[in-house]
Image (cartoon, rainbow, N blue to C red):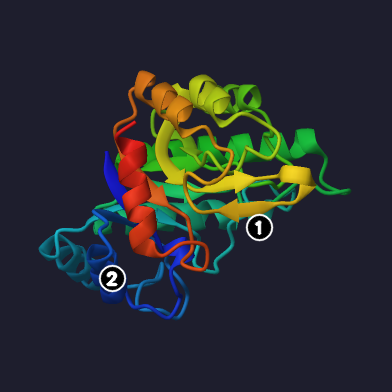
Amino acid sequence: MKVGLSGIITPNEWSFAELVRNAKAAGYECIEVKPLDGSDLSLDTPEATLKDMAKLAADEGIEISSSCGGGGKPSNLMTDDEDERRAGVETARQMLRVAKTLGADTILHTLGGRPSPELYYHVAYANALRSLQDLAPAAEDIGVNIGFEYVWNGFLTSPLEVAQFLAQVASPRIGFYFDPGNMRIFHHSEHWARICGPFIKKMHAKDFSWENRVVQWLPLLEGTVNYPAVMKEVRAAGYDDALISEVPASIAPYEVTAEAIRKIIAM
């Protein structure tokens, strides 16, 4: 496994080159990029520039493992507004193309919305399923995975439901982006790892506590995620890819988190 750092929790002001070099200096081996509208890395960055970025990272010995976010473009795949849904699908296709050029093998997607008083759960489910089935041929042709992440949006809130949903999508390129911290509020993360293990495409690392109903994001190995059990399950599922930090520097220095990830990988 490789030690990774996500652009989700690094300063938006960092350029791509700064992300690469700061990640390397802090002891990381790979990065997850976050395209942002108006930055040097966006979904509209020219292909030649993306190739230069990929070369810069390779020259520094840093792998670009994954990409996350639609960079401000429409991304709602569960909406009942058909024009908006189609726009979200097109954004995801663009995300796949950018990831491919950078050399990443996975994009993170949260499905971009949530059920609401007007959008009934079963309708959101059907729309999200149709959107991912629409995207499956592009993901398969381009050779980049789409990893769905559970993110407290009131949708696909159990591992059984996630596994059923991804089985219905029925594409080898569409799976689960596993974040052990996200489900710890109600569930045991290792249960998700076992049930959704065959679908895991990429994995975040963060830690969580809800003692006395107080939500806390904590430094790795200081919360309630049972990482020994989680690692046992992901290894049994055959996962041997990046473990990517989503711990901001306000919670723990990047160097400290990189060392904690090494300890987790050694479990």
- Is residue 105 visible to us here? no
Residue occupying the point 59% across, 62% down: 74
Image quadrant holding the C terminus, namely top left
User: What amino acid type should be assigned to the residue bearing mark 2?
Assistant: Asn
- Is residue 112 visible to us here? yes
Which x, y percent locates residue 195?
Answer: 53, 20
Residue occupying the point 16% across, 68% down: 56
Q: Which residue is mark 1?
A: 84
User: What amino acid type should be assigned to the residue bearing mark 1?
Assistant: Glu
Q: Which residue is mark 2?
A: 22
Is 131 displayed left or right of 199 in the figure? right
Question: Which mark is in front, 2 or 1?
Answer: 2
Is 224 displayed left or right of 21 in the figure? right
Residue occupying the point 73% across, 48% down: 114
Which x, y percent locates residue 76?
Answer: 63, 54
Judge by depth and name the residue closer to the eye, 47 or 226: 226
Which x, y percent locates residue 16?
Answer: 31, 73
Q: How many marks?
A: 2
